Structure formats: C-alpha cells, structure tokens
C-alpha cells in the first residue's frame, strides 16, 4: 500500500502546510485509522511558532476521531470499520511508568521505563492526526470504540481537551462541597470547570474575560465567573469566598500570573492543580507559599490517555452529564487546514476549537 | 499561684535572655507541665535573628518533655505527675482544618477554621517550652503520655524533629522499593532519611558534607551519602541511580539550590516533598519541571502534631526501630540557655541538637 | 434553670412516649439548642422495638435543627440565637480516633482513644434531639451555623441521612465515569444515589420497588431503577451494564440479600460500600468473592459528623446541587410524636421521612 | 523447533507427573525462558487435589526464574541469555483492568477488559513454570532482569510469595507506628510480616504454632508470635496490645477461623487485609463487625505482577532489607518433582518452600 494521503506537515517555524505523504505500513501492534474528524490544539500552535521543536516533515495533531481501516496482525478485539478514538497520549501499557499508573510519562524502550512526556507521541515523535490516515501504535492499549449514539463532534474533545481539563479536577482531588477556582476558561479550563462540577465542588469560580467563554463557563458548571480585566481576581475570589479561599485552584493557562494567583487564593492545606504549559521558569512567591509551611500540594498533569480513559470520557458524554459541542466554534475541511491554523493561531472570531474533516 | 519561673524570653532581634516570668494560670482545657527536658530548634534561631517576628516578651521553644503539674478543670484522662510530651504543633482538634485532617493549619476561633500555620502556638503565638513550666492548650488533644521504658532524651526529638522529618517521607508517599534522595542531613533531614527507611525505600541517598552527619545518616538509613562539596549532587544522584533518578526527593534545608536539585533528580511523575523553611521566593526551573507537563507533585508540610502523632512516634522509639539519641550532641542546664543559643546559632562544635534541662 | 421541657423518651421495648424532663445544665464545652425541627430515623425504630438497647429514660433522636439557647463558658465562635445543626455523630475532636480522621469511632475518655461507634451519642448514650431542647457536647466541634438562605427542612437531612448516604459514594471512591449500583432507595439509599451522581458516576442503577421512591431516585440521580419484585436485580444490572457489572456497589438496606447482590454485581477489583445496619452475621458467598482473590474492597461507614461535614453538606443544598425536601413526606408537631412513630415504624402512607417541630 | 522438554503436567486429580512436551513456538510478543529455578505453591496443591480445576495436560507452576532463550519478533529491550524472572501474574498491560491499575484482574481480549483472576495465566490457563522451558506472554510487560548480584534462590520468592505477602501490608495501608496482626506464618504470612515491618509497623504480632516458622517470623520482623495452640490468639493479641487491637489485621491462611479472628482483633476503623484462598463461603460475625457500623475496610488481593513489581521486589532483596532464603527449606531436581510434590503436599519435614532446578 504505497498510496498517498493528505497531511498537515510541519515544515519550519511559521509553516505548517498540507502536503502529500505515503499512507504508512501497519506493524503487528498498530492500527491504521481513517480520520473522520480532528482538531487543532494550542500545543500545535507552539509547534507552528517553533516554540516547541519537532522534526520537520512531521504530521501534526493528536486528537483523532476515525474509523479502523486496517489492524496489525497481533491486534485482537477490534474490527475494521469500527468507529474509534485514541487519546492524545498513547501509552504502550508495558513500561515501568505504565505499570506504576503514570502512563503519560511512558518510557517504553527507554532504560528505566520512564521518559519525560514519553506518552505523547502523535504529532510529537510520530506522525499525527491532521491527515487522512493515522497510524495508532499499541492499538490494543489505545483504541476506544465510539458508542453508536455519539457523533464525531460529541467525542472530539475526549482525546485531549476533556481528558486534560478533567485531570485538573481529579489531580486536585476535588471532593463534595469544595470551593474551586479555575484560572482561564479556554477549552481546557472549561473542561476543568466541568470536571470540578462533576466531582461535587459546590462553589466553582472561573476567571475569564471573553464574554462567549464566560457564558460557556456558566453552562459547564461555573457558579461565578470573575472578569480579571475589571477586578483583581485574587481579591474578588477572596471576597466571593468570604475570605476563605479555595480548597483547590486550577491553573489552565500556563502563565506566571495565573500560577501565582492560583496559589494566592488557596487556603492553607489546599491543592494547586496546574494544567498550563509554561514557557519559562516559574516563581513561587514567598508569602502565599507560607515560606514552605502551608501544607500545600502542587500537582501538574499531562493529559491522561489510554482506551479506558477514553471510554470513561465518552460515557460522560453519552450519559448526558456534559456536552462539549459548544466548544466547537468553527468547522473546516482538511483542505482548508492552513486557513484553520491561521484563524486558531490568531484566536480570531471567538474561536474555541475547530473541527477538521478530511 | 503567682509563683515565678525561669524562661527564655525573646527581647529583641539578637537577644533571647533567661528571665523570670509568672507561672501561668490553668484554664479549663489547659494543662500545666513542669518541663524536664527541652531543646532549641532552627526556627528559634530565625526568631533570635529577627527573621521570623514574634512579640517581645514571648517565651521561646516548642519541643517539650515534662511532667503534668496541674490539669484544667475540664481535662480528663490524665493525672498529675504523669510524664508527657506535646507536639510542637498543638491543634485544637475542633477547627474546620482539624476536622479535615489538616491540623497544622488549625484555625480555631478564626472565621473559616483555617489559619496559616495556626497550629504552631508554642513559642510563636503563646509562651513556649524553654522555661520551667509550660501551659499546654487543648490538653486532651495534645498531651501524650511517655512510656515508662523511655527516657526524656529518647523522646526529645518527637515533638518536632521526628514528626517533621518523618512527614517528609510520609507526604512523599514513599512505597516499598522506592529510591529517595534527601537533601541535607541536619536533624530534620536525618529523620526524613529514617522515615524513608521505615516506609520501605530501598535506595536512600542523603546529601551532606559534614562527616559527623554523614555517619549518623548511614546509621539512620541512608544507603549512600553524597558530599556536595566534592561532586555535583544532581549528577552524582543520577549516576548512582543509573540515570533513573528518584521516585521521591525530600528537601530538608530551605534553600533554592536544594529545592531545585531535588526537582532535577526527580523522575517524571515523582514527588518533591519539601520540609525546608524558605526565606524568599522560590524558582521552579523550566526544564526539569518539563514546562508543567511532568506529572510532578510538590508537597510542603508543617510538623504534624497532636497526641496520637506523638504516641506513634514514641512507639517507633520504644519498638527499637529508631534511636534518635545520636542527634543530641550537647547538654545544658536551663540556666545556661543563652550559651546554648550561642553554640547552636553558630553551629559550633558539630552541634546537631542540644538538650536543655531546667 | 430547673425548667421543664417535653421529650420523646424510651421507656421499654415497644414504648417511646412524650414526657417531661428537666432542661439540662450547660457544661463549659456544651451548647444548649432549642430544637426547631427534627425527625425520626430507622435506627430509632430499632430502639423502639428493643432491637438496639438503650437505657430506659433516654431521650431519642439524633437529627437536630435548632437555635442556640445557651453556650458553655468555654465555647467561642458562636452566639446565642444562631441557627445551627449538629451531626448525628458528635465527635469530641480530641480522641486518637478523631486525630486519625476516624471521628465516628471517637473514643474520648476511653483508654485507647477508639470506641466502637463512640461518636454516636445523641439518643444513644446521651439525651437526643426529639425534645424541646438538646444539649450538644463538644459544641465547637459540632455546631454548624445554617446559612440564612436555607430553611429548616432544607437542612433536615444533613445530620444523618445525607451524611450517611453520601459516605456510601465517598467511601466507595466513586470516580468520573463509574458505574454504581445502589441497593434500596430509602432515604439513605436515595442520598447514596445523589452522592454517586455528585461524584461523577455516569451510570447509576438504583434497586427499588416502591413507585414513589423510584420517582425520587430518578430525580436524585439514578439513570435506571430496577424493580426487584419484577426481575432478578443481579441479572438485570448485569444486563444493563452489558455484563460488565459495577465499579462500586452500595448496600443501603442492611440485609443478607442486598449485601450479597451487591457483591454479585461488582466487577473484579470493585468496591462494595456498605451502609446498612445488619441484624446478624453476614455471609460472603464463595463464588462472587472469587475465593478471596478478586481484589475486592468492602467498606462500612458510620455517619460522618462534625461541623465541617455539616457545613459542606449544607453547601451542597445552598448551591442548588441537591434538594432533599422531597424526602420529607409528613409533618408533625412534637406533641404528636407518638403518632409519628406509629406511622414511621409501620412505614405507612408512603412515608420517607417526617419533620417534627416542637 | 519441535524439540522436547520435561514438564510437570496435571493429569487428573491426585496426579501431577513429569512428562515430555514440545517446546512451544514463540509468538511476536512472547519470550521463551529456559527455567533455571522454580518452586511449588500451595495453589499447585489445590490443583493437584482437584480442588481448583485446570485442563488435563497443563503444565503447572507460576514462579519462574530463568534465562531468556528466545524473544518474540516484536519484543524490544531484552537480549537472549539475560537472567530474568516473571511474576506469577502476567498482565497484558493493555486491558481496561490494567489501565485502571488492577492488573491481576486483567481482561485482555474479554469484552469489558476485566476478567476474574484473569492475570493469572501460568499453570492456570496456559502452560506453567515447572518445566525446562516456559513461554512468557506479553514479555515486555512481564520480564524483569535479575541484578547480577542476586542468585536464583535469592529472587525465587519474588514472583508470588513476596509479591502476595507484601501486598497484604500494602493493601492494608500500613503506616508508621501501626500495630499489625498477621494470621499464619507460612511463606506468604512471613512475607506479610516482612512487608508490615518494611512499611513502618512498630508492633507486629504473628500467629503461628510451628517452632521453625516462629523463629523465621521473628527474623523477618515479628515483634511477638502467638502460639494459637497454647492461647486463644484473639485474647492474646488484645492482651499484648493492652486492649487496643490492631490497626491492620492480615489473614494469610484462607480459613473461617483466621478471617474471623482477624476481624475480632481489629480496632474500629481498621483494615482486614485478606490474602488467603478460601474454600467456601465466609461468615462475617455480627458483633465484631459492629453490625456494619465500624468503619471497617476489608480488602482482598491477588498477587500483583508485572515487571516493575518484580524489579521493586528484587530491589528489596538487593538492598539487604530482606533475605527470603530461609524460606527455601528443600531442593530438588526437576526429575524429582513428583517427590517434591509429595513432600510439599503433605507438609512433611518442616517444608516451607522447595527449590526445583531443571
């Protein structure tokens, strides 16, 4: 099968272009997926801008929805034609990291079984999902069948956005009755808000200034949304919580200001759950850190992957607990992907997420 | 009872002096303890130097071993003459923080039940233990009877040093087979080492340069001790672990260098358990933090208190699992406490901890 | 204050009567509450029938809503006239059990700090809430102010029913995407259903036959309700879950059949969270227990108490996440309490819970 | 490779015989191991007696130590000639169960990804280790290289005995200062004792009557050993703990009496960690279960497997924390295996474990 397909390829900083590529061969543990819907992530923009380096020629994208085209010889339990998703993170399942439950830092093949961000392969170390076809490694660990009742767009946020956003609440160990502050209500922050809601937080305060996002935040579970352009968000959250602060604060932007504000609104003994991708050193300010004596917990999380994670996220959608379709604000054909990148990179027209259909 | 007692009193930065004070009245929930042994903590030196402000006139010290002299009218379950310790942290037991298991941030009487470091009262917000008598608040929450088999010096490290040091391993969630690095082998770092050993770590690497501390570190559980004056400790720990790094890294000094080194030796998904008291902002370096995508956990802990904690620590001593007497390098009478402060503040003569007996 | 009040008093098996009692004195740590609303619990019926022995002359009831009439001399942070609730379980806060986070087994005053069910005092070891006045011990640990926005009936389920029911989901460690089966949809089972919903379960299957309870179950979060009089509930739950079974099964009745059914629907590695009060030995059947090799967890829970628990439960109500008023099916004056007992003990007229107002 | 090897084969209840079998073919994910040492497990005796049914013709045994003879085409990260062990449980790594951290209930290929005891394949659903060669499935998940410093006999207990025994303490969540009772000091109970010691328990009470086992128990960490033939073990444990009971009780025999005794010595809120394989229904007695109101936790565990587990257990040995060689009381050549079964099945001559070398 030396057939060709279209794929969005990183050429050099500033240039991701649609080009032709050979449809890959299928190894014994792989599955070839025909992509039916995919999307562009903020991380892809970091790649586009050259801020996160990948090898020129790589196909970008890590959020696949598709149909099984061909299964590797050793892959069991699936059939061709089956609708599936795979997570942005595709752990092997057999590394030391996986066996410790730390699938995102999968070090399959590495000496110690852990590799920094090693689970992130699509559009990072192997070809990604913004293409007509996608080779999914370790298919039995990663392919999750889509329930018949769900459309592509209903599950499009599962591979990365929902998984990452929910992990903000999960790693923050939100419990019933918690107060949770979520800094930034972009796609991931919105899903962190939804995750906090699903886990039983009773006071959820989002921080966001864009009106459309504020509206979606309320719809996805925020009890209050603080506009940081009008009030100091730390002061306002302390006011809204009557001086108590949050049990959990979720950072969903990746900036010093939001990281620091998250710490400032945290009660002693609280958890700062950080989802953002930072672009430099971070500072932990002395006073709100209580000189290191505040019984604080700071956790970071790389998007959880694997088929069971995907199954559970799709269950959330199928059960009607959450509808992420409001996040899909624009739709493009794969042929228009350069245009989609232009819109998304410049955050024009109120874009939250785009749907790309080959 | 307007009798007088001797007490080490903070006068002004640079001056802690032994002076006379009235023996305090005993409220219904209090107990008055006649101190038989106490000690000086690094935190007391911060107070001495004016780096941590307390009210002039306050009695310093938070590590009491003594005998019950008088019980408050509502205190049940103890008797006068009983040998007891109390933790450095004396939680009320009834605040929201306590009811959440976060006793060190006890906010009894505060609006929300949480108060930054609110559990630390002795020698901070109320008179402390470097005196002939000590008033213990919320006595039923805090007084722990000393087993007959144990001497004062055997339990002298329980109120703070062991409790804090062990918490480094506990909050790091050390499990059987872990590799743990402990930065600095002062009294708290040594107890962190011992705690990691007690919890099943199989490779424990201390970082320390003082030969006497290196020896005690080996005796208390370190498999290896790295001399940071001779090798780069990060490189050496990575070498000793064959490039794998630690599952848990414990910071027990309170400096940027050690915090950062702890992060650098941590495997992806590992836990940095910080015990140090920092004196300024901290920096989280970009690369070892994996831009926030390393599934790291950073925890800080203020010394756990309460009588059950003390009981368990004394059980560790009584069972022979650990002997902390090697930490007591010098002994003084309370009358000599200014001399003891001078020795301890200047870390002369290989001092680790001093025993003060009124 | 040798004034008299009315109280529902256990006389002998079969007889709880309304009688006069002296309003109790207030000790230094106590608070006297004027009861404004209370209710009858299934446990009270066990007492009535003599199945659970209490001392004749004891006032029954453990679900108080009221107003502070008088505070003990050592009680701070409250004021007379304040509307409050206290949990059915009133831990001291200072026992070893409390300091371990096991407040319901509070052993204040006992030799080891643990006492079986020691936290349950109201209507068990001290006078209870079915009276005009109630003495609350360890008031600072137990009094939780009621938000102004909430009526008595809105918070009436917090002291026991909600706290117990929610604990079924919490101790079962329900996570996002879980399948949860809840056996019996009485008041506690209904709150277990609501708790599972609040914690993110996406498939919640209740088991119940009474049509009114089935309706409320759906309103409080059940996705499906299985009528055990029409189908075998184990078979039906396996059918509904396509053979997978539940991640968590909650027993909320206290019978061998439901305990066993809960185990039978549990997937390997799942958790059986038992809330029921059993009246004899229980049998764990061999096959579904996988001979002890199923990685199962079985947990039991006695209603969590303490003011912070109550605050959080009232937050759930205040935030609009749950409305438990549908559980209050009947209302009586305290003068009619014998009639209320008769109705409730015989489960007539579709009664779920009654509200009793002095 | 149609070569022949010797293997211990189940023929019918009462008969396991040494016979010839074809050395198996190696699939892409498999590895063929030349066995250098193996052993017989109590479970194998259940198979021998027909109490646990397996297919006639199956090779028995699940505790392999060996050398890699041949690697499957897709297996990376190992080399032929490498000394390795594999756990008794060989999870796939990619099932839903594995992705939830429940590797022993691995349901690879099953509809829902969970299968009761599905991780146990050797000598259960596929040919086992009592043979000259062993085919290890999912080799990358399961093969753990043996450190050069360790002999076969030093690691022989890792695949099952240590992994199972330690899990008793781990699933019991033993913490520093705990009191732990371990019922029966056979090989697994001894390792549970060692595990409790490694995790920081300070009072460990074994229950055992065989003098040789009592001695090893003391050497492996028991502070006390109760001879149940001389005293009532429940009474004696309550006496030794001054009436307090255990925080954790570990059942390591698989009998009603020991399960029940474990519950009886448990403090309220404690954990019963069950390791035994039961042969019928179990009874939970009413009184010590506190009618279901004791905040108890009961956990069962099937031996944890996977290469990372094996690596950690071998680290315990390599670090000198534990030496399990005293458990190997007898040695046989594979040719003598029928004799070894006879000795072991009849528990003659003080046998604990045998070493079998082909």
Image (cartoon, coloured by chain):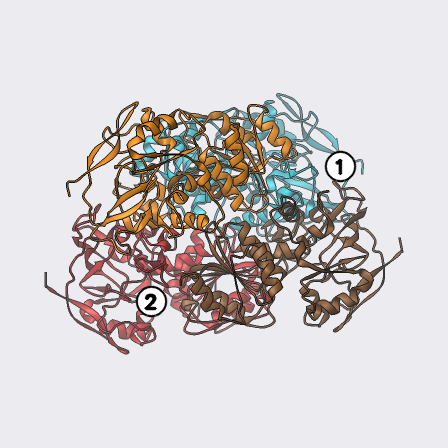
Chain colours: A orange, B cyan, C brown, D red
Q: Is residue C173 above or below residue D258?
A: above
Residue C47 shows in the view = yes
**Drawn side of residue D141 relative to residue C107, left or right:** left
Which element is circle 2 on? loop
Q: Position of residue A200 (x, y in %)?
A: 55, 46
Give the quadrant of the C terminus of chain B.
Answer: top right
Q: Position of residue D235 (x, y in %)?
A: 56, 68
Give the quadrant of the N terminus of chain B.
Answer: top right
The chain ID associated with circle 1 is B
As drawn, the label of residue D352 is 2
The chain ID associated with circle 2 is D
Which quadrant would residue A60 be assigned to in this image? Answer: top left
Which element is circle 1 on? loop
How many residues crowd around disc 2 within 10 Å: few (fewer than 14), some, or many (20 or more)?
A: many
How many residues crowd around disc 1 within 10 Å: few (fewer than 14), some, or many (20 or more)?
A: some
**Drawn side of residue B144 relative to residue D96, left or right:** right
Q: Is residue A338 above or below residue A248?
A: above
Closest to the observer, C102 or B133: C102
Which quadrant would residue B262 be assigned to in this image? Answer: top left
As drawn, the label of residue B24 is 1
Which quadrant would residue D326 be assigned to in this image? Answer: bottom left
């Amino acid at each position: 099968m030396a057939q060709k397909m279209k794929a969005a390829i990183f050429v050099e900083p500033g240039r991701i272009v649609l080009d032709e590529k050979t449809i890959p061969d299928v190894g014994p543990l792989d599955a070839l997926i025909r992509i039916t819907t995919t999307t562009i992530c903020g991380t892809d923009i970091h790649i586009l801008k050259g801020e996160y380096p990948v090898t020129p020629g790589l196909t970008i994208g890590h959020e696949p929805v598709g149909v099984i085209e061909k299964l590797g010889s050793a892959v069991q339990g699936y059939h061709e034609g089956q609708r599936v998703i795979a997570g942005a993170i595709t752990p092997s399942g057999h590394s030391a990291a996986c066996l410790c439950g730390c699938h995102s830092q999968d070090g399959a093949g590495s000496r110690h079984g852990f590799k920094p961000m090693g689970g992130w392969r699509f559009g990072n170390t192997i070809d990604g999902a913004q293409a007509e076809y996608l080779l999914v490694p370790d298919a039995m660990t990663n392919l999750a069948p889509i329930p018949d009742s769900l459309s592509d767009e209903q599950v499009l946020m599962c591979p990365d956005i929902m998984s990452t956003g929910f992990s903000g609440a999960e790693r923050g160990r939100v419990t019933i009755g918690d107060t949770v502050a979520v800094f930034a209500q972009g796609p991931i922050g919105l899903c962190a808000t939804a995750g906090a809601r699903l886990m039983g937080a009773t006071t959820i305060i989002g921080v966001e200034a864009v009106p459309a996002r504020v509206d979606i935040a309320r719809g996805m579970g925020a009890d209050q949304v603080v506009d940081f352009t009008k009030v100091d968000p730390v002061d306002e959250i302390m006011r809204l919580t009557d001086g108590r602060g949050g049990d959990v604060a979720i950072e969903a932007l990746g900036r010093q200001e939001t990281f620091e504000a998250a710490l400032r609104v945290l009660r002693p003994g609280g958890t700062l759950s950080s989802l953002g991708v930072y672009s430099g050193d971070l500072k932990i300010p002395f006073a709100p850190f209580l000189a290191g004596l505040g019984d604080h917990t700071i956790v970071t999380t790389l998007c959880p992957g694997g088929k069971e994670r995907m199954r559970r996220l799709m269950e959330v959608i199928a059960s009607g607990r959450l509808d992420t379709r409001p996040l899909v604000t624009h739709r493009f054909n794969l042929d228009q992907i350069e245009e989609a990148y232009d819109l998304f990179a410049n955050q024009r027209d109120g874009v939250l997420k785009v749907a790309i259909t080959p």
